[in-house]
Image (cartoon, helix red, strand yellow):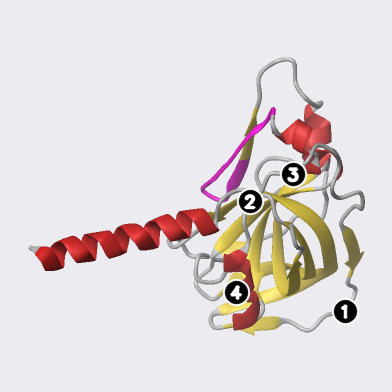
Amino acid sequence: MKKALYICLALLAVLTWRDWSHREIVHEPGILVTELPRQRDLAAFTPIVIEEYRLTPRAEFNLRARVLSRENYRWGNESDLSPLDLALGWGVMSDQSVLDRITITQAARWYFTRYESPAPLPDQEIIYNSSNMHMIPANPWVRKKLKEIRKGNVVRLKGKLVDVDADSGFHWRTSMRRDDTGNGSCEIFYVEDLYIEES
């Protein structure tokens, strides 16, 4: 009986620590990220092969952004390739006073915003200054660092926007724009380097 109690207490301690270590970071009001994502389209490229997946680089891509939300994925064709999505914001969508009025959620590889009227921003401003991005780590170090990211972190990410194909017939297409919405509007981001800024 004592052994079962100790196991339960140890499990509770681990879960408590995990929740605490991934708690949201809250900032003072004001825009944290002034720069827009930077993209350079590629005319020539070398395909990237990861197991059964073929990645076609479409653009060099790097950005500094605030993490609005993160969602881990363990199921689905693409979860072994892309284990998490990050909803990222810049400009007005990095401002705590704006984000305090918006509820942000993620599910099924989508990113959702909800707010009460009056809207803190026009919808087009929310769309233009934020995005849900599917993260594909380029190596084990990047995969480990992605796991450390918390909601509210300011991060710098560098890599490529890619399309994904597999012999099974699976295919995934990246967005190449920041002003789109709906199906196909997420960036598929092959992350080669990242930096988590100190809070």
The answer to which of 90 and 17 lies nearer the viewer is 17
Residue 11, quarter of the rendered image: bottom left
| Image coords of residue 17 (percent x, y) | 45, 60
Which of discs 1 and 4 lies nearer the camera? The answer is 4
For numbered disc 3, what is the local secondary structure? loop
**Sequence-first tag of 3 and 2:** 3
The residue under label 4 is 143
The residue under label 3 is 27
Distance from Cα at disc 1 to Cα at disc 4 = 27 Å
For the stretch drawn in magenta, the main secondary structure is strand
The residue under label 1 is 44
- The stretch drawn in magenta includes residue 169: no
Q: Which label number is shown at residue 151? A: 2
**Sequence-first tag of 1 and 4:** 1
Name which residue lies at 92% across and 53% down.
35
Decide: marks 1, 4 in contact (CB < 8 A)?
Answer: no
Amino acid type of the residue tagged 2 in the rendering = Lys
- The stretch drawn in magenta includes residue 108: yes
Amino acid type of the residue tagged 3 in the rendering = His
Q: Is residue 39 above or below residue 32?
A: below
